[in-house]
Amino acid sequence: MRVLRKPKWLRDRLGDLSNQKHVNRLIDSYSLNTVCKEANCPNKSECFRNKTATFMILGNICTRNCSFCNVSNGIPEGLDSREPAKVAEAVIELGLRHVVITSVTRDDLADGGASQFAKVIEEIRKREENMVVEVLIPDFNGDLAALKTVIDKKPDILNHNIETVQRLYAEVRPQAIYERSLELLKRVKDLNPNIMTKSGIMLGLGETKKEVIEVLKDLRKNDVDFLTIGQYLQPSKQHYHLKEYIHPSVFDEYREKAIALGFKFVASSPLVRSSYNAAEFYNMIRNNKNT
């Protein structure tokens, strides 16, 4: 297959590495994982410079094998009972006011790891009750009780990424179900209408504009508040083949369409990822509510 040349708007942004080293040392000292490193996020340099990170709980081995993802898959190890406290301590030491907690998918666990999410939220709030907590969760195999376990701890934002258009699920997310992900996002509001919901989609996997617009409409039908749209970057030759680099102007078009559909806030550009500038995202909405 033809290898596409990376366009100029996707050049890495490096800059000062001092805070990156600080964050890396802290994460290593607590034996924690971050999606920034595990998923090889293109924004990790910028986020680490700002002393922020998205913590990845439940280990670093995923039970699913999505063809786009750089996180390792296989048979995971057992849960670390100290993980919730360690994450909370690292969050406080970093001086965060908005923390994002995500995970690998753990289909081997009865609740998909929902109880570990709940414990992490609880431990963070013990130390800083005003912390804004955002969780980026897997689908828990559609288990409503597992979702409720997380919702009962009242995260401020619940994110679950739709990732791609429905037609491509069999190739890109073979163990996931498009309708199940939409149902999960809808159920959040049923359980607690005060929790903001968020989702994201990647572009460049072979989707059409019409299909992308259908995803946006489906998310709004299920009352999703926030949306992120970013460029898929193929991690290796073994991963799903990149079909196209999408021009920034197209991202702008999608943002305008999404706003018109009723999303409260939309981040849409090539290097946007689901947790990118999450604090700014939330604060903008909160400040608008107070004006």
Image: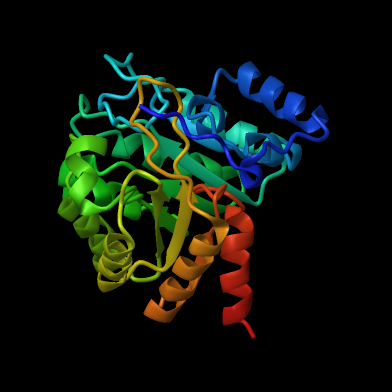
Q: Is residue 25 visible?
A: yes
In the image, farthest residue toward the bottom: 291
Could you say where residue 73 lies in the image, as x and y percent from the top left?
Answer: 32, 19
- Quadrant of the snapshot with the N terminus: top left
Q: Is residue 131 visible?
A: no
Q: How many marks?
A: 0
With respect to residue 241, does 24 lie above or below?
above
Q: Give residue 288's quadrant in the image.
A: bottom right
Q: Residue at x 25, y 34 (%)?
A: 112
Q: Give residue 110's quadrant in the image.
A: top left
- Quadrant of the snapshot with the C terminus: bottom right
In the rendered structure, the answer to whether residue 165 lies left or right of residue 287 reads left
Could you say where residue 190 lies in the image, as x and y percent from the top left?
Answer: 24, 67
Could you say where residue 128 lies in the image, as x and y percent from the top left?
Answer: 62, 49
Could you say where residue 107 lies in the image, as x and y percent from the top left?
Answer: 21, 29
With respect to residue 114, does 279 lie above or below?
below
Q: Residue at x 26, y 26 (%)?
A: 65
With respect to residue 145, does 115 lie above or below?
above
Work out whether residue 184 or residue 164 is closer to the camera in this orientation and state it: 164
| Applied colour scheme | rainbow
In the image, farthest residue toward the front: 2
Q: Residue at x 62, y 42 (%)?
A: 10
Q: Residue at x 56, y 17 (%)?
A: 31
